[in-house]
Image (cartoon, rainbow, N blue to C red):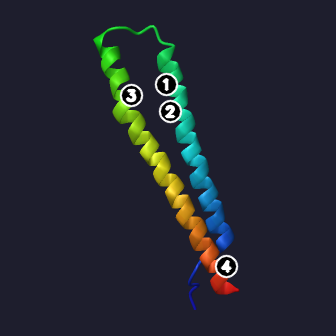
Amino acid sequence: MALLGQIPEEVDSLAADLDSRAGDIETLISAIASKLGATTWTGPDRDRFVGDWNSTLTSNLRNVAGSLRDAASVARQNAEQQRQASA
């Protein structure tokens, strides 16, 4: 007979990893912003890049981080539901 369900501890570990990766993205955003601010690059290409970074690119990365955190939350809820069903 095939196993149906989950091992909650494995799903908790997955959730922790998803949260960790979201944190990695947030750290990456800060690191790139810092590096960008420290460059001596000037001109319209820099201005355009900074504009894109400060709007679209950063926003997209924050959305990915948020989606990973949402997925972690759902995984934790699923693990808890499995624990309750197995009790």
Residue type at numbered disc 1: Ala
- Chain-order first, disc 4 or disc 3: 3
Residue type at numbered disc 3: Trp
**Could you say where residue 76 lies in the image, as x and y percent from the top left?**
60, 66
Q: Do the residues labelled 3 and 1 touch (CB within 8 Å)?
A: yes
**Could you say where residue 79 lies in the image, as x and y percent from the top left?**
62, 72
**Mark 2 to mark 4: distance in Å?**
36 Å
| Residue plotted at (46% across, 53% down) | 67
Residue type at numbered disc 4: Arg
Residue with the mark numbered 4: 83
| Residue plotted at (67% across, 79% down) | 83
- Chain-order first, disc 3 or disc 2: 2
Instruction: Decide if residue 32 is on the left or right side of residue 7.
Output: left
- Chain-order first, disc 4 or disc 1: 1
**Residue 29: which disc?**
2
Residue with the mark numbered 1: 33
Secondary element type, mark 4: helix
Q: Is residue 39 above or below residue 73?
A: above
Q: Are marks 4 and 1 in contact (CB under 8 Å)?
A: no
Q: In this view, does 61 lie above or below 46?
A: below
**Could you say where residue 58 lies in the image, as x and y percent from the top left?**
42, 34
**Mark 4 to mark 1: distance in Å?**
42 Å
Secondary element type, mark 1: helix
Q: Is residue 75 above or below residue 34?
A: below
Residue type at numbered disc 2: Ile
Secondary element type, mark 2: helix
| Mark 1 surroundings within 10 Å by alpha-carbon count, few (fewer than 14), some (14 through 19), many (20 or more) | some
Residue with the mark numbered 3: 53
Q: Do the residues labelled 1 and 2 touch (CB within 8 Å)?
A: yes
**Mark 1 to mark 2: distance in Å?**
6 Å
| Residue plotted at (65% across, 72% down) | 8
